[in-house]
């Protein structure tokens, strides 16, 4: 922190994105930063989602930081607890915990133009930062429908991302709403112990067989002794997954083999043709995330499970009423209804150069340059921002690409003596025009499914429309021509070590000193 109490960098969020950014700052010799995390622990997604069966659907050897391999994953696809332990371990090992304020939420951030810094209001003490990196996650704000009568319900009701472990569900009558990736994991995990499970399905998912299996202790040991072997496995998994990109982004018919796989899986596991019909999606495979499971269909057919497809019309004190008016007594209501990624609260909390919030500027349709920077918001970097999400590969890879980009931006600021960087509106517009043109050909936009990839204006603000290595290439260097760079103002220079030549600011993001700035 400099003499005026301005930190070089403040990071919001302690999931893969925020922790990865913090670790990189340390590796670059930047020590003057703070991580704000509203949760009680680090881990983000993997801390918040503790529902039974929670698992990543990217293989373990790939779903980790490239610089921090873990040789002893217990299963081929990592379970939530192992990922959480991994992230806690990274935070400890790379000395990030010292910088982290847990249970501290960012409530608002305002760009102060003459001081060239962000002023932050938090649930703890106020802060100021030269550079603000927000890594709030895309899937961190649980969404559930406003069901008529829900406030009258006398049983327990909770979202899968806020699982109530005080309610162990044994012998209970449960209604679970949703049939996406989360439901597919949670239902088989709770089905054996509940008394009755009413599963409210709106749209059935495409489900393919899961290749998960325990990793043999000998192999774990081998990975520990010969890390190159695990790196090879990681590269092979990555490359295989990229093979899906042409089908997802341009030629959906190339996904027909996947669809055949899913249809065979359904036929093999569900003998009843009427039930099979109800479980067959009416949209193209890939339009929504393809789900992996061997026990979803068996769980649905268990005698204590009932599939309800007519929707929910009402919730009463002790029951739920479906779209056909049939009432079912229940004790617990579980929402496996996902998230609202296109309406993240953080956008309402960031106020830029012209005094408007990011949400006001976006007006329902989030957009950024390379999913990372936004015109009108100097020195702000977003991780897992607009159009960075994937349907086929590891988000950690995308986050690491963004972290490279932010690091290079900080280096550029130092080298050029810039106190301020802001993407030019023209660069941002051209980039988003290209992204939307490409998405127009994708299965997400044409596959006939309504999905959370679309914002309230009907625009796909979520998906990245290409190979992930293209994104990596485009974020490899901070591309200064796309940016306005400004030297320190007199006020900023006087009120901080920036330009004064001292303190960590000059050495870190190094926004000090007058220089030739474009
Ligand atoms: C159930 C589930 C399964 C998933 N499965 C996969 C998968 O198989 N493969 C894959 O690649 N990805 C998967 N994802 C996506 C996953 O979110 C990313 O892979 C990755 O974990 C994102 O990391 P992040 O740091 O960007 O966000 P998060 O992990 O969401 O972390 C963001 C953090 O920011 C904090 N935060 C938000 N706002 C504030 C604020 N105002 N102040 C302070 N703190 C704040 C949150 O509390 C949270 O801890 C899954 C997500 C979910 C929910």
Image (tube, grey):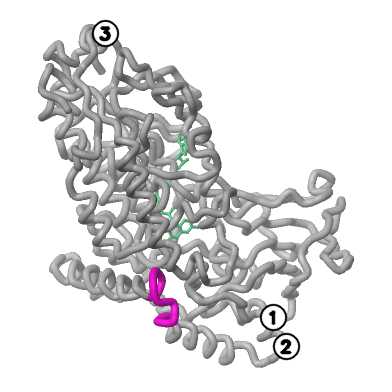
Residue 324 point in image, percent of width and height = 86, 69
Q: Cβ–Cβ below 8 Å for labels 1 and 2?
A: yes
| Viewer-proximal residue among 337 and 82 | 337
Residue name at image x 37 percent, y 37 percent: 374
- In this orientation, does residue 165 appear? no
Start and end of the magenta stretch?
247-255
Query: Which residue position is annotated with label 1?
Result: 278
* Residue 281 picture quarter: bottom right
- Distance Cα–Cα, label 3 vs label 1: 66 Å
Q: Which mark is residue 274?
A: 2
- Distance Cα–Cα, label 2 vs label 3: 72 Å
Q: Cβ–Cβ below 8 Å for labels 3 and 1?
A: no
Would you say the beta carbon of the disc 2 residue lies within 8 angstroms of ligand 1? no
Q: Is residue 254 magenta?
A: yes
Is the C terminus in the top left, top right, bottom left or bottom right quadrant?
top left
Query: Which residue position is annotated with label 3?
Result: 491
| Viewer-proximal residue among 274 and 297 | 274
- Distance Cα–Cα, label 1 vs label 2: 7 Å
């Amino acid at each position: 922190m400099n003499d005026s109490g301005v930190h070089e960098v403040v990071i919001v969020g302690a999931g893969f994105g925020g922790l990865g950014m913090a670790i990189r700052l340390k590796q670059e010799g930047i020590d003057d930063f703070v991580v704000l995390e509203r949760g009680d622990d680090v881990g983000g997604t993997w801390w918040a989602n503790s529902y039974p069966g929670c698992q990543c659907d990217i293989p373990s050897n790939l779903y980790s930081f490239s610089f921090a391999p873990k040789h002893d994953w217990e299963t081929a696809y990592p379970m939530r607890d192992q990922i959480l332990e991994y992230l806690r371990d990274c935070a400890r090992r790379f000395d990030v915990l010292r910088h982290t304020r847990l249970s501290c939420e960012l409530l608002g951030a305002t760009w102060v133009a003459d001081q060239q810094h962000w002023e932050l209001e938090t649930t703890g003490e106020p802060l100021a930062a030269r550079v603000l990196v927000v890594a709030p996650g895309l899937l961190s704000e649980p969404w559930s429908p406003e069901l008529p009568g829900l406030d009258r319900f006398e049983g327990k009701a909770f979202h899968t991302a806020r699982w109530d472990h005080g309610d162990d569900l044994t012998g209970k009558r449960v209604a679970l709403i949703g049939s996406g990736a989360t439901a597919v994991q949670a239902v088989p995990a709770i089905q054996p112990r509940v008394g009755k499970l009413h599963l409210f399905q709106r749209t059935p998912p495409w489900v393919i067989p899961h290749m998960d299996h325990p990793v043999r202790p000998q192999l774990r040991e081998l990975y520990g002794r010969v890390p190159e072997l695990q790196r090879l496995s990681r590269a092979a998994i990555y490359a295989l997954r990229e093979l899906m990109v042409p089908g997802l982004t341009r030629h959906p018919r190339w996904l027909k083999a996947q669809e055949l796989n899913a249809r065979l899986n359904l036929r093999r596991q569900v003998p009843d043709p009427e039930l099979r019909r109800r479980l067959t999606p009416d949209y193209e495979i890939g339009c929504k995330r393809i789900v992996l499971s061997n026990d979803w269909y068996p769980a649905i057919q268990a005698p204590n499970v009932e599939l309800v497809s007519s929707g929910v019309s009402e919730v009463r004190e002790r029951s739920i009423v479906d779209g056909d008016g049939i009432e079912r007594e229940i004790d617990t209501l579980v929402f496996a209804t996902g998230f609202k990624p296109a309406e993240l609260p953080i956008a309402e909390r960031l106020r830029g150069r012209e005094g408007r919030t990011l949400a006001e500027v976006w007006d329902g349709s989030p957009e950024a340059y390379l999913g990372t920077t936004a015109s009108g918001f100097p020195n702000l970097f977003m991780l897992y921002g607009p159009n960075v999400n994937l349907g086929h590969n590891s988000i950690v890879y995308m986050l690491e690409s963004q972290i490279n980009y932010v690091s290079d931006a900080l280096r550029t600021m130092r080298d050029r003596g810039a106190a301020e960087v802001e993407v030019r509106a023209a660069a941002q517009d051209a980039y988003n025009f290209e992204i939307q043109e490409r998405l127009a050909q994708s299965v997400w936009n044409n596959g006939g499914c309504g999905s959370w990839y679309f914002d309230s204006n009907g625009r796909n603000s979520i998906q990245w429309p290409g190979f992930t290595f293209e994104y990596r290439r485009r974020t490899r260097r901070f591309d200064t021509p796309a940016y306005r760079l400004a030297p320190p103002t007199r006020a900023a220079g006087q009120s901080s070590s920036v330009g004064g030549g001292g303190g960590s600011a000059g050495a870190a993001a190094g926004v000090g000193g007058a220089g030739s700035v474009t």
